[in-house]
Image: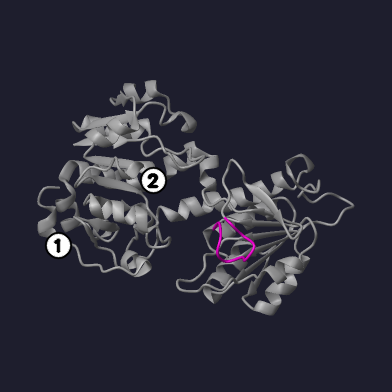
Amino acid sequence: MIIGVPKELKTAETRVGLNPSWVKKLTSFGHQVLIQNSAGDASGFSDESYVLAGAKIVNSIEEVYEKAEFVVKVKELQPYEYDLLQENQMIMAWFHLAEDVDHEMLQALLDKKVTSISMELIVLPDGTRPTIKPMSEIAGTLAMLEAVKYAQYGNGGKGVLLRKLAGLPSSNVLILGGGNAGLNAAQVAVGLGLNVTIIEASMKRMDYLNNQLPQVDVLYWDEELMFEELIQSDVLINTIYPLPGVTEPLITREMVSKMKPYSMIIDITGAGLIETSRYTTLEEPIYYELDVLHYCVPNMPALCPQTSTNIMLMTTGQYIMNISNDGLKDVIENDVIVKNCISTLNGEIVHHEVGINHNMPYTDIKMELLSSK
């Protein structure tokens, strides 16, 4: 099989679909791997390292899409890529079609009959999402580290060191959600000696958090209690997404207006839950609204692309190998996990969450449509 890895086009996205280690594994099985030149540079993977692993370096993204049967990338397609798609091509990426409404990208996949394999929809039998978990851990860790950075005077903050120092009161950190991202953000904040509160809606998760972080106040979700904590916080870290179909913000503009002047909101989900949040990028990560610094970058793992790429491939690498070796039809017949993370196939939506999210018809995967894969 010919596997292609393009350079990511999304603004400030630094990760790459394959590292040299997995290229070497794929080429050892006789597969041809095409890497767009400099695709791995930001992740610390040089063109030379890919060549040594058996890859062929190509000069353009157009050549990758023209020749590859199976495209492996990180982030969702960008508009320039729509016209590059080849009919019946397979693409693995973070498409986010079950969460974000991107009709243009979805329609491009349907028009070209692309088989889209959505990394974020990989779900293990116990309900674990193995690609999301490590990225959430990285994002949670970085959320607190970025708060430390942007609290500094030269980076747009009010010149506060988010660190416990003798003789001075510690800053207050409020974390919404105690999942993987919230836990990791809290671990960093505790290590800095800060006063940390997590608000969580699951009693079972609260018990886990109390055992893991006895220094942290873990509170059960209550709107009035949340507001009381909010107006006392120096840093608010949001790690939760709006519920499907819910359009009203959890934290309103009025609530934000009551926060301390020059306090901070670090919103790793980007937008939706907090009324004053809007997506920012790693190139322009912050803005002020109501005298509160906002940082709303949804792809923070791109700040540490080598770590993020390597840990991503701990999950996706074997699926890429299996599809390349056995063909998608055989893999789907023998692996329900792969079957359940396919969003589009042969011009149809084949994942119910994608169809529901876009208010479009969907169907089950028809195995006869995979005879050529």
Q: Secondary structure at mark 1?
A: loop
In depth, the one of 346 and 212 nearer the eye is 346
Rendered location of residue 33, percent (x, y) = 26, 31
Which contiguous range is marked in magenta? Answer: 269-278
Residue 24 seen in render: no
In depth, the one of 80 and 346 nearer the eye is 80
Q: Is residue 255 left or right of residue 39?
A: right
Which image quarter: residue 310?
top left
Which image quarter: residue 87?
top left
Rendered location of residue 8, percent (x, y) = 42, 38
Residue 68: image tag: none
Rendered location of residue 217, percent (x, y) = 69, 68
The correct choice, above or below, for 324 with respect to 103 in the image is above
Real-space Cα separation, disc 2 to disc 1, in angstroms: 29 Å
Name which residue type carries label 1: Lys
Residue that carries the numbered disc 2 in the rendered image? 79
Residue that carries the numbered disc 1 in the rendered image? 366
Q: Residue at x 71, y 71 (%)?
A: 254
* Residue 276 is one of the magenta-drawn residues: yes
Q: Secondary structure at mark 2?
A: helix
Q: Mark 2 touching mark 1, by CB under 8 A?
A: no
Q: Is residue 213 left or right of residue 257?
A: left
Name which residue type carries label 2: Pro
* Residue 178 is one of the magenta-drawn residues: no
| Quadrant (top left/top right/bottom left/bottom right) for the N terminus | top left
In depth, the one of 63 and 168 nearer the eye is 63
